[in-house]
Image: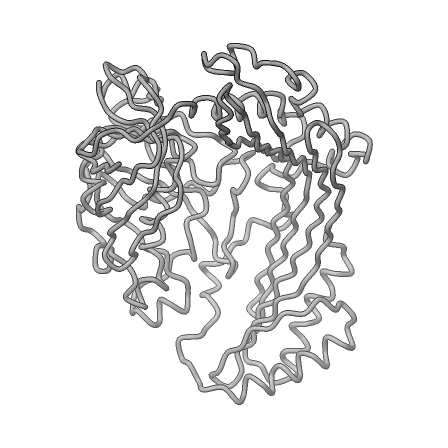
């Protein structure tokens, strides 16, 4: 999608930066196109097309640093813009930690942008009529409207009916080119086909329940949204008659679509910016076993064919497969070139690209299996607000889900809180499933914990 002319303009910007007196420069060109069809109750509600193109320009001038963004692609205008930007940078205080990454660490294998096999040229041939057909075909309203939901959808609750359905189909393409004054040139191109739907159902007493489901694929041939609406309805109906369970300590199983909510704070706490600001409960944790020995998180950015896989980070540094947490021990922080200088630590990559929680204690575990293993407890299927204190690791989240006994759901629960501290929570990990969704950003299967505080 990035044309040869646009590539040449990005490279010309490096020349303009040198002319302006910059000792170093990095140019990032981003382009994206998204076509979206929104439906309401089985009919087309909105059609949009979004196209975006921008240049991010990082300049290193006389020991100072500045970052700028522009969407003009006219060479003469860009030259003038960069000269003025360089003058602005000279007015800033010097910062010796602001440097380009060592060229030896930078990516040399992403020349075409399609190396990860997540660009589908079939996206360019999708017609407006085909998008409309895909959006309408995924809608469930035509077969559910005006009548009671069939038992397979209503989760055994009689008289449930569909009140409303809001769906969105989209297909998009993203293209990124990064070049710098040290000879770096790398590119990443990715397509995405997506569908998400939110439904509201009503029981015979007039109580309403809502839920959401989605799917995504980088390839059109693998994209299938046919069950999204039905799954959203099942999830909404499963809430019927919910109420809080008695407060106390329970075994907790987190469903695969919610489990990343408990993993994200760990990854955020390992980010160099959080550590440098003292806003991390994992400061000084590298090499320490702080969690259950069964906890393992790998960064696997080279998973070909899976959305989000990437050969380089925002600085152009080459990614690699590496343990983040291994046997409960912290192995890696995410330190870019700037934070490396600030913290006196070895640089890695800016962030986890494709983190995966490793199955434990055995492969093949899913939420149903974990409930059977736990016997009694609460299955969490949704989070309803809450917060985490990144400095201490303390958290409080509203949840809803299912109370289970002898490994089987007994009734839905809602309006409950889970509270605790992430350092303690992960010491009580009982098992990690392998039922993660490949379309998710973080590959996290269902999780099970013991002795979690619930209050209703």
Where residue 242 appears, as percent x and y from the top left, is 37, 26
The answer to whether 325 is drawn above or below residue 194 in the figure is below
**Residue 142 lies in what quarter of the image?**
top right
Left or right: where does residue 310 sit relative to residue 9? left
Closest to the observer: 73 or 158?
158
Where residue 155 appears, as percent x and y from the top left, is 46, 15
Where residue 244 appears, as percent x and y from the top left, is 30, 31
**Residue 372 lies in what quarter of the image?**
top left
Instruction: Classify the position of the C terminus by image quarter.
Output: top left
Left or right: where does residue 360 sit relative to residue 35? left
**Seen from this angle, which residue lies furthest bottom?**
91
**Seen from this angle, which residue lies furthest front?**
205
Q: Which colour scheme appears in the figure?
A: one colour
In the image, what residue occupies the spot 30% across and 37% down? 416
In the image, what residue occupies the spot 35% across and 40% down? 298
Closest to the observer: 316 or 270?
270
In the image, what residue occupies the spot 44% across and 85% down? 94
Closest to the observer: 341 or 273?
273
The answer to whether 338 is drawn above or below residue 402 in the figure is below
Where residue 229 appears, as percent x and y from the top left, is 59, 24
The answer to whether 432 is drawn above or below residue 118 in the figure is above
């Amino acid at each position: 999608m990035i044309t040869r002319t646009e590539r040449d303009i990005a490279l010309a910007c490096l020349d303009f930066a040198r002319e302006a007196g910059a000792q170093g420069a990095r140019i990032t060109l981003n382009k994206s196109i998204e076509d979206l069809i929104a439906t309401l109750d089985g009919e087309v509600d909105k059609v949009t097309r979004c196209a975006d193109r921008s240049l991010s320009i990082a300049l290193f001038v006389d020991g100072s640093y500045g970052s700028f963004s522009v969407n003009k692609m006219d060479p003469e205008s860009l030259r003038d813009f960069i000269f003025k930007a360089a003058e602005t940078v000279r007015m800033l205080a010097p910062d010796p930690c602001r440097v380009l990454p060592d060229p030896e660490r930078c990516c040399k294998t992403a020349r075409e942008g399609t190396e990860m096999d997540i660009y589908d040229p079939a996206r360019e041939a999708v017609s407006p009529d085909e998008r409309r057909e895909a959006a309408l075909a995924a809608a469930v309203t035509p077969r559910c409207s005006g009548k009671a939901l069939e038992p397979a959808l209503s989760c055994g609750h009689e008289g449930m009916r569909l009140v409303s359905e809001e769906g969105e189909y989209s297909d998009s393409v993203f293209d990124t080119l990064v070049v710098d004054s040290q000879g770096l040139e790398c590119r990443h191109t990715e397509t995405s086909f997506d569908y998400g739907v939110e439904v509201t159902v009503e029981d015979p007493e007039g109580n309403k329940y809502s839920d959401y489901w989605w799917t995504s694929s980088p390839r059109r041939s693998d994209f299938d949204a046919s069950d999204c609406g039905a799954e959203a309805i099942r999830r909404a109906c499963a809430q019927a008659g919910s109420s809080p369970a008695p407060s106390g300590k329970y075994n907790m199983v987190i469903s695969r679509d919610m489990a990343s909510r408990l993993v994200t704070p760990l990854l955020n706490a390992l980010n160099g910016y959080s550590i440098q600001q003292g806003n991390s409960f994992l400061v000084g944790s590298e090499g320490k076993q702080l969690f259950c020995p069964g906890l393992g998180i790998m960064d696997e950015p080279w998973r070909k064919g899976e959305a989000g896989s990437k050969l380089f980070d925002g600085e152009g540094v080459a990614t690699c497969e590496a343990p983040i947490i291994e046997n409960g021990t912290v192995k890696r922080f995410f330190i870019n070139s700037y934070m490396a200088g600030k913290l006196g630590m070895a640089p890695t990559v800016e962030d986890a690209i494709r983190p995966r929680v490793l199955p434990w204690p055995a492969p093949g575990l899913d939420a149903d299996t974990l409930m059977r293993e736990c016997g009694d407890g609460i299955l969490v299927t949704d989070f309803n607000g809450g917060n985490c204190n990144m400095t201490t690791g303390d958290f409080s989240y509203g949840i809803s889900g299912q109370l289970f006994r002898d490994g089987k759901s007994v009734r839905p629960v809602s309006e409950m809180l889970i509270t605790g501290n992430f350092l303690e929570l992960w010491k009580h990990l009982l098992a990690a499933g392998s039922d993660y969704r490949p379309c998710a950003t973080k590959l996290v299967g269902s999780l099970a914990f013991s002795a979690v505080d619930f209050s209703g």
